Amino acid sequence: MPNAKTLRALIAAPEILVTPGIYDAFSAFRAQEAGFKAIFVSGSALAAMHLARPDIGLLTLTEVAEATARIADRISIPLLVDADQGFGNAFMAARTMRMLEQSGASGVQIEDQLDTKPTSFPLGRPLIPACDMVDKIKAMLDARRDGAVVVSARSDAVSTEGVDAALDRAAAYAAAGADMIFVENLKTRTDMERLIAMIGRRKPLLHNLLRTGEEVQEAQTLQAMGYSVALFPGVAVQAVGAAIDGAFTALAANPVLDDKGMQPDRIGAADYLSTIGSPQVPR
């Protein structure tokens, strides 16, 4: 799987790796055409665009693996895939790694949230014990067929236990062998610099650029601070949602096809057909 080595090289490069979140083969292909060097199969984007549901643990491993396989079949750049909590305990996390790697993942990201959210607070972020997350990380590392596949460990402890606990968890996950560390919801530059001082020299760091109003908003600032990956998980979903709303509102008001309805080839059909040739119609 050469893309796993490519992903590692991109993460290790001096220039920060800007990675958009995508949700299907079409959005992945458009990201590749735009020039991105790697993309992120976002769990929240998959839930929104495939289920029209919030990201509350409704997706199954099979659904994520099938989506990953369709995406990997259409593009040639590395895929970092959101595996949520690994879909179960350490044994299940190992199976998750095997399935997603087989589906074409160059990297897999796992988080330390509880596998099943309480129905009373489905948008909460209850955590598993750090030792259980360490077991999942080690199981995924052992399950890799290709040792180059990246295991990214995410902690959601800031929202639940505070920054200090999140940093302690990040250090434990780095010590367990995770290839990359992601502490979600670090809102201030000071807290981000604490993470960099603790781990940044030993492991590459990923930062999520999802919410406006936080202190750091630019990939170049992250690069200057010492981060390796700038993740933009929500851009595609927001853009597509706005475009569909506008198009359907206009169509409902005036159901006429105009020039705006004639779109260029956005799926690369011409190149694809020229590559495989024109099939002969049997007589």
Image (tube, helix red, strand yellow):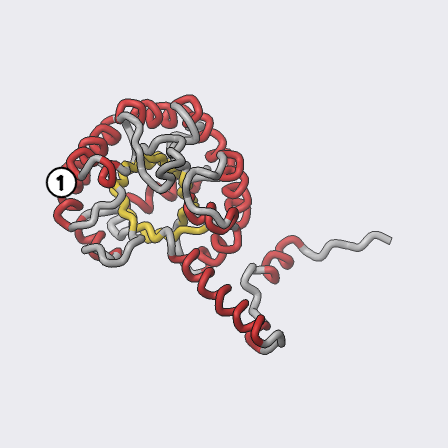
**Residue 33, above or below 179:** below
Q: Residue furthest right?
A: 283
Circle 1 is placed at which residue position? 197
Image x and y of residue 39, in percent: 41, 49
Q: Which residue is depicted at the point 52% across and 70% down?
A: 249
Image x and y of residue 219, in percent: 26, 56
Q: Nearer the viewer, residue 275 or 239?
A: 239
Image x and y of residue 43, in percent: 42, 43
The kind of secondary structure element at disc 1 is helix
Q: Which residue is depicted at the point 33% across and 35% down?
A: 111
Q: Using residue 67 as the reference point, say whether residue 195 is left or right of it.
A: left
Q: Using residue 157 as the reference point, say whether residue 56 is left or right of it.
A: right
Work out whether residue 243 can be spotted: yes
Work out whether residue 78 can be spotted: no
Q: Residues within 10 Å of mark 1 (few under 14, many from 20)?
A: few
Q: Which residue is depicted at the point 27% across and 36% down?
A: 155
Q: Nearer the viewer, residue 213 or 116?
A: 116
**Residue 200, above or below 93:** below
Image x and y of residue 81, in percent: 42, 41
